[in-house]
Image (spheres, coloured by chain):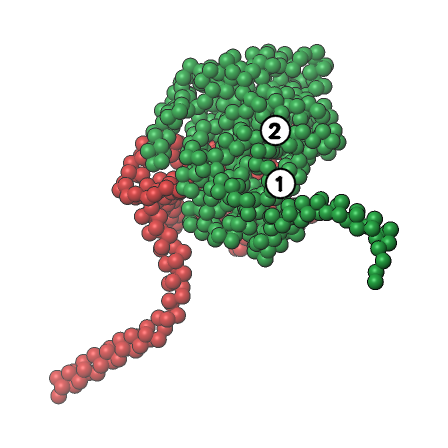
Chain colours: A red, B green
């Protein structure tokens, strides 16, 4: 009997499983049309452009003339293109500076603005104003200020007896100067992110540390900084993405010059696609740039995990 | 019965006497119908500059004359070039009339046959107004608008000559004469350079790409003159090319403001307009802002002169724009667009260009309009410079498809020389880098 019961139970169970599977299929049949619009959009604006870019990268196509399949010739050309190699290093250099400096300054500013002092609200508002300005407008204003003969920056330096700088008009100072514009523009964003983090920190650890006699620096180093880490990581990721794709400011102020001294990958890519009309070659640059961004993103995620492990 | 009165006889006689004039006027108007495309709408795409502003501000004249409605856009030069190339390549451009920088896009547009040949339209009396007066367009401007195969696919609108702007006050103070040769220009610039007072003897374009037109101005004074030979072979590492490069390096390093390696025309204009530079060699279109007292400290003190003579030749660099009709437009829109081209480059608009300082018109008649010249806010030397420049003008850039790559590659080398790099080495490197690009482009032709 028991065997019959077992068989019956098994049959009942398999019947229930089959019923569940049937319901699942019916559910999918009912609801898949809802996925279609989103899928169409994703295919149209992400998948198709990507496949098209990959296809174009193995073609020679100059606007105004015919297209021909060239295999990996564009990638081979990139491999030997010194101007492209230089643009990669310049992009990494610019990105490193344009991430580290705003994160450090933004964190410091957030700590200052977290404290209570008279007119704090007004000071915060003034501090975040640069972030609200349009990048192209910002770039045009800075361009006027950088003029070596008539710019206000050199006038300010002269008031302190400091010799004039060439700012963006010299190959050796152009990248640090462009980073200065980025720092001015985007440090407020980091400050806002970190300020949000500071506001959410618990007070108990600080009270315990105070009882234990911890100094202000020790409280910051061993309590604030680890607790802020997730917020700092978000700020670093956002800044890295922004710095890697920086184009408008650089293009308006220097167009990649003097010479090629500020030609980042984005400028190189833009010139190839829309000034030289080398669509095939520019597509190959996009593919390599995408691979580079993926590599950097993986590196950031890996560092984040390492940071988490170390914090545990 | 009606009696013939003396008054009636006089009126009748006067009518008879006036009839030939009336008949000829009716004939002239009847021979050409400006309103044949009334009700049509055309789109006009221009680069943003004072000349386009004049056309857009006055387009109602055209609309009232023809009954054709016009939609105009004026886009900054760099973006406009990209936009129209991409739109033409798509096969369905959004415009019927296009303004083209001949020194950049002439060969590209001609090779792809993106714009219609205007010669059949000019020859067609039913499509061309009797007062069009094609002979009034300067021969140089017409040649510039004509492709190598004889097709004329743009109508000349504007010719841009490089001229020498100088600060009369600085020259008078120093008691120096306006230079007539490049050697004199360098010596004068050296003499007028006073770094401690923040005064440069000379200012010009140093930034990559834009600087090539200043370099070619110097090259035009050599025996070689051009950057390419008749077979479109590159000549940018020859002794003459290197000599021009040496001069470029010398005058910018010794006499221009610090940081000139990053100067485009706007930085150079700022320096000159604020009285910080004694001389500026650049396009003719900057006279208006320089003479505007609200924007310039040198208004009323600007002198104009033709570019100095080189060691072997005397030429000024010529650039220009033309208006074309999209070959992709339908026949009716092409007809309406042709009427627009005739109106846009008519004598009245061309005179407006000249007297407002918006640039040198492609027609010759405005230069002969003494009344307009006398009442202009620009001095006589400005107009004399334009006329003299038109006689020595020569294209300032080679007529090749990859002009922008050429300017970027050569321009980078020139910028490096301002930083101290060796001219011959830089020019050879640039020539080697660009030669395969040019050869590939020529093979595709």
Q: Quadrant of residue B291?
A: top right
Q: Position of residue B9 (x, y in %)?
A: 83, 51
The answer to whether B335 is drawn above or below residue B313 in the figure is below
The answer to whether B387 is drawn above or below residue A79 in the figure is above
The residue located at (48%, 34%) in the rendering is: B146
Q: Position of residue A218 (x, y in %)?
A: 51, 42
- What residue did someone put label 2 on? B284
| B441 and B340: which is toward the camera | B340
- Left or right for B25, reference B250: right
> Which quadrant is the N terminus of chain B positioned in?
bottom right
Secondary element at tag 1: helix
Q: Earlier in the sequence, mark 1 or mark 2?
A: 1
The residue located at (46%, 15%) in the rendering is: B223
Q: Position of residue B97 (x, y in %)?
A: 53, 46
Residues packed near mark 1 inside 10 Å, few (<14), some (14 to 19) or many (20 plus):
few
Q: Are marks 1 and 2 on the same chain?
A: yes
Query: What is the chain letter for disc 1?
Result: B
Q: Is residue B121 visible?
A: yes
Task: Report, in whole angstroms, how far the alpha carbon at label 1 lies from the one at label 2.
Answer: 28 Å
| B178 and A201: which is toward the camera | B178
Q: Nearer the viewer, mark 1 or mark 2?
A: 1
Furthest toward the bottom, the residue is A1
Query: What is the chain letter for disc 2?
Result: B
Name the mark on residue B131: 1
Q: Are marks 1 and 2 in contact (CB under 8 Å)?
A: no
């Amino acid at each position: 009997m028991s065997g019959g019961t077992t068989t019956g139970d098994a049959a009942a169970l398999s019947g229930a499983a089959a019923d569940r599977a049937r319901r699942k299929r019916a559910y999918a049949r009912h609801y898949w049309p809802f996925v279609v619009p989103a899928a169409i959009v994703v295919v149209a604006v992400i998948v198709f452009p990507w496949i098209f870019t990959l296809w174009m990268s193995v073609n020679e196509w100059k606007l105004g003339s015919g297209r021909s399949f060239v295999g990996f010739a564009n990638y081979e050309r990139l491999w030997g293109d010194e101007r492209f190699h230089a643009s990669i290093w310049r992009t990494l250099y610019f990105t490193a500076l344009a991430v580290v400096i705003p994160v450090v300054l933004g964190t410091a500013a957030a700590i200052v603005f977290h404290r209570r002092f008279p007119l704090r609200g007004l000071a915060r508002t003034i501090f975040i104003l640069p972030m609200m300005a349009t990048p192209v407008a910002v770039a045009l204003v800075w361009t006027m200020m950088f003029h070596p003969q008539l710019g206000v920056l050199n006038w300010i330096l002269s008031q302190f007896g400091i010799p004039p700088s060439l700012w963006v008009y010299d190959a050796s100072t152009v990248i640090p100067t462009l980073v200065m514009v980025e720092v001015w523009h985007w440090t407020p964003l980091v400050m806002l992110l970190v300020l949000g983090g500071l506001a959410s920190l618990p007070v108990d650890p600080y009270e315990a540390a105070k009882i234990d006699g911890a100094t202000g620096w020790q409280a910051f180093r061993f309590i604030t900084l680890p607790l802020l880490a997730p917020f700092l990581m978000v700020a670093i990721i956002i800044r890295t993405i922004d710095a890697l794709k920086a184009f408008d400011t650089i293009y308006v102020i220097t167009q990649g010059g003097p010479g090629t001294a500020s030609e980042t990958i984005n400028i190189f890519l833009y010139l190839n696609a829309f000034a030289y009309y080398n669509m095939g070659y520019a597509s190959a640059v996009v593919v390599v740039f995408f691979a580079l961004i993926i590599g950097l993103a993986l590196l950031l995620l890996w560092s984040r995990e390492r940071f988490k492990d170390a914090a545990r | 019965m009606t009696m013939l009165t003396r008054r009636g006889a006089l009126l009748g006689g006067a009518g008879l006497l006036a009839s030939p004039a009336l008949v000829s006027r009716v004939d002239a108007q009847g021979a050409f119908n400006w309103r044949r495309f009334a009700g049509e709408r055309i789109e006009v795409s221009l680069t943003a500059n004072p000349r386009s502003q004049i056309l857009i501000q006055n387009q109602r004249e055209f609309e009232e004359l023809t009954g054709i409605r016009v939609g105009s856009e004026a886009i900054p030069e760099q973006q406009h070039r990209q936009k129209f190339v991409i739109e033409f390549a798509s096969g369905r451009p959004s415009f019927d009339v296009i303004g083209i920088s001949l020194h950049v896009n002439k060969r590209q547009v001609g090779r792809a046959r993106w714009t219609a040949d205007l010669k059949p339209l000019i020859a067609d009396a039913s499509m061309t107004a009797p007062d069009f007066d094609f002979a009034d367009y300067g021969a140089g401007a017409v040649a510039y608008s004509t492709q190598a195969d004889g097709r004329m696919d743009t109508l000349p609108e504007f010719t841009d000559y490089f001229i020498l702007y100088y600060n009369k006050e600085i020259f008078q103070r120093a008691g120096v004469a306006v230079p007539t040769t490049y050697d004199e220009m360098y010596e004068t610039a050296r003499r007028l350079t006073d770094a401690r007072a923040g005064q440069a003897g000379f200012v010009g374009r140093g930034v990559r790409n834009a600087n090539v037109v200043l370099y070619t101005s110097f090259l035009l004074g050599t025996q070689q003159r051009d950057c390419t030979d008749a077979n479109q072979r590159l000549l940018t590492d020859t002794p003459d090319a290197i000599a021009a490069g040496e001069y470029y390096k010398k005058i910018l390093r010794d006499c221009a403001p610090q940081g000139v390696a990053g100067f485009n025309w706007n930085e150079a204009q700022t320096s000159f307009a604020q009285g910080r530079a004694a001389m500026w060699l650049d396009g003719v279109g900057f006279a208006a802002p320089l003479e505007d007292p609200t924007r310039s400290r040198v208004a009323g003190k600007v002198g104009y002169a033709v570019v100095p003579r080189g060691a072997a030749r005397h030429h000024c660099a010529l650039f220009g724009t033309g208006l074309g009709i999209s070959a992709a437009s339908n026949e009716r829109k092409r007809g309406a667009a042709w009427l627009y081209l005739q109106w846009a480059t008519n004598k009245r608009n061309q005179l407006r260009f000249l007297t407002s300082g918006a640039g040198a018109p492609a027609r010759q008649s405005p230069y002969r309009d003494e009344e307009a010249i006398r009442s202009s806010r620009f001095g006589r030397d400005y107009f004399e410079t334009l006329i003299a420049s038109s006689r020595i003008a020569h294209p300032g850039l080679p007529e090749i498809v990859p002009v922008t790559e050429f300017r970027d590659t050569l321009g980078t080398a020139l910028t490096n020389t301002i930083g101290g790099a060796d001219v011959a080495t830089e020019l050879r490197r640039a020539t080697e880098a660009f030669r395969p690009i040019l050869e590939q482009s020529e093979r595709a032709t």
